[in-house]
């Protein structure tokens, strides 16, 4: 499956059993997060040793309700702790990955 062109296209893929193997790791992590598979998403994000991995990692700890740990990862990503909803942040991160 080709990489989605928009967040709406991305959301339509969430009904599948797994993300496509050829997708970038960040998009796979976001797919698992969007499919309510926190553990699979976290496994990918914690092995991404870059700013994007830190941002996804921060988001996941925010989902988990661990504000302290999320704050640490937002700082590593160079991001402020967000005031938007979790859904809005998931969309923001996904759109960033799709556009870059």
Image (spheres, rainbow, N blue to C red):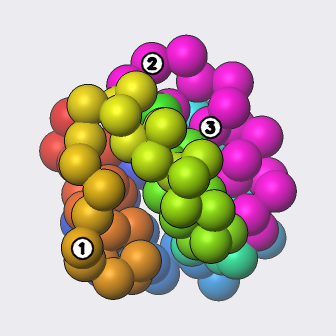
Question: Marks 3 and 1, how far apart in space?
Answer: 22 Å
Most foreground residue, 49 or 28: 49
Q: Residue at x 27, y 64 (%)?
A: 82
Which circle marks residue 83 in the picture?
1
52 inside magenta stretch: yes
Q: Residue at x 45, y 18 (%)?
A: 50
Q: Which residue is mark 2?
A: 50
| Percent position of residue 16, x then y | 69, 75
| Percent position of residue 96, x then y | 23, 48
SS label for mark 2: loop
Q: Residue at x 55, y 16 (%)?
A: 49
Q: Residue at x 23, y 48 (%)?
A: 80
In this picture, which residue range is highlighted in magenta? Answer: 37-53
Most foreground residue, 18 or 56: 56
Residue 6's quadrant in the figure?
Answer: bottom left
Horizontal arrangement in the rendering, residue 82 relative to residue 63 (left or right) = left
SS label for mark 3: helix
Q: Earlier in the sequence, mark 2 or mark 3?
A: 3
The local crowd at label 2, few if under 14, some if 14 to 19, many if 20 or more residues have their Cα within 10 Å, is few
Q: Visible in this render: residue 20? A: no
């Amino acid at each position: 499956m080709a990489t989605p062109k928009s967040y709406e296209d991305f959301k339509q893929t969430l009904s599948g059993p797994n993300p496509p193997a050829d997708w970038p790791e960040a998009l796979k992590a976001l797919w698992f997060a969007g499919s309510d598979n926190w553990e699979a998403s976290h496994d990918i994000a914690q092995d991404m040793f870059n700013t994007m991995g830190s941002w996804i990692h921060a988001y996941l700890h925010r989902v988990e309700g661990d504000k302290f740990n999320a704050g640490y990862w937002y700082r590593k990503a160079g991001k402020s702790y967000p005031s938007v909803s979790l859904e809005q942040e998931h969309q923001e991160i996904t759109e960033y990955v799709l556009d870059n």
